[in-house]
Image (cartoon, rainbow, N blue to C red):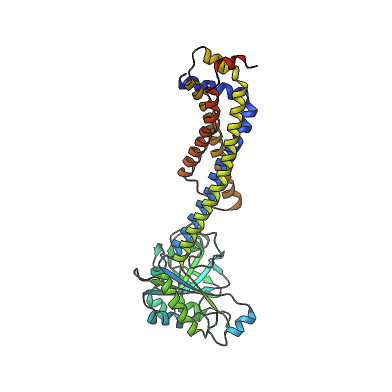
Amino acid sequence: MSWGEAFRSARDSLATRKLRSGLTMLGVMFGVGAVIGMLAIGAGAAAQAQDLIDRLGLRNVLIQSRQLRPDELREARKKSLGLSLRDVAAIEEAVPGVKLVGPRLKVEPWRVQAAGRKTEGTAYGVSHKHPAVLPLDLAEGRFIDARDDREHAQVCVVGSAIRRDLFVQGSALGRRLKINELWCEVVGVLAPTGSAGNNNNESASGSLDRAVFMPINTATRKLERDPLASPLDEVIVRMQDNADSRQTAAVIKTLIDKLHGGVDDYEIVVPEALLDQSRQTQRLFNIVMGCIAGISLLVGGIGIMNIMLASVLERTREIGVRRAIGAAQGDVVLQFLVEAFTLSALGGLLGVAIGLVMARTVATYAGWPTVVTPSSIVVSLAVSVAVGLLSGLYPAVRAARVPPIEALRYD
């Protein structure tokens, strides 16, 4: 029997028993679909975590002001001013391995308007060192400089979405916008990043498309704030290349604990540690999903073996006739192996379609990013085919070993 004849025989056999063949493929279909869908969700989460860590800066240590209840805040202010420029100066002077320190103040509420137009955004007071601790790409103009810091200049740099909403036509440079009650001149526009919808991000990455940056001294002196609020909401510490982030974070914590009188009104985030944790979580997720998918494919393989054993039993007389007219045992083995391969391959292909639909559905309706990698498709198909061949091997060998005389007598 040639390979072409074997595939035609498998096609005719499966077409004759459409319902049974379809039900047999369900296990393989759902197993492959689960593998691709879950791996796509996991890969999307890993990519999102990696993007966040990249924006936070792998060589950075973030010190963030902790949100306290009103009664806790009043008690904390008896011993600690909160995160402040004093902490920035102390870190620069006392902590080894520090390259740059960038303070940040988040301004609330976030009312931004100009030329009769209003939009939503987040205003930040930052130092002129900010682009050195967190990468920022400018589309127009310049960033805040040291002179702006010293002179408390009323200037700002806006994100691409703010620029689009407020200044529809013409250049935004040199034009004025109002942040709360303060008028500022636009001196720069950031390049688009695609994060405009993330207005509630409290991390250093923030939403750059809807961000407005102004000098830190301008924000602290010319904008109204709660007197009990921390002077800064975040300090970004850029380390030297040879510095250990975890050790640096431990030294910073010891220093700030002393400056704050032991008040726990801040927290330290180490992106490098977050990256390690993210990778460990991803490995655990892949192991769990692999086990679940393996069980699904095992069930599918058992179904294929069951249906092939039934097929051998039903076609015993056919096997006897073929053996009587000269078919070798290898021909019979090939016939049933090809049939099992066809079942698993068709189930695998339909499972790929299910997995792609699952990934797209999650991305569309749940808002969760998914990434379908070619390797997940190839591995899923390869495993499904291997399961099908292994499941069909025993029935095929059993069919080939049936003596022709007994097969012809079978009723």
| Residue lying farthest to the bottom in this orientation | 78
Q: Nearer the viewer, residue 229 or 175?
A: 229
- Picture layout, residue 6 above or below residue 114: above
Residue 143, image quadrant: bottom left
Residue occupying image coordinates x 47% and y 78%: 253
| Residue lying farthest to the left in this orientation | 242
- Picture layout, residue 216 above or below residue 351: below
Q: Nearer the viewer, residue 380 or 266?
A: 380
- Number of labelled discs? 0
Please state the horizontal and vertical placement of residue 349, each as a whole percent of the image.
53, 35
Please state the horizontal and vertical placement of residue 297, each as a whole percent of the image.
56, 40
Please state the horizontal and vertical placement of residue 35, each as a whole percent of the image.
54, 45
- Picture layout, residue 226 above or below residue 190: below
Residue 153 visible? The answer is no
Q: Nearer the viewer, residue 118 or 6?
A: 6
Q: On the rendered image, what quadrant is the C terminus found in?
A: top right
Residue occupying image coordinates x 55% and y 79%: 265
Residue 324 visible? The answer is yes
Please state the horizontal and vertical placement of residue 85, each as a whole percent of the image.
46, 81
Q: Nearer the viewer, residue 90 or 221?
A: 90
Residue 59, image quadrant: bottom left
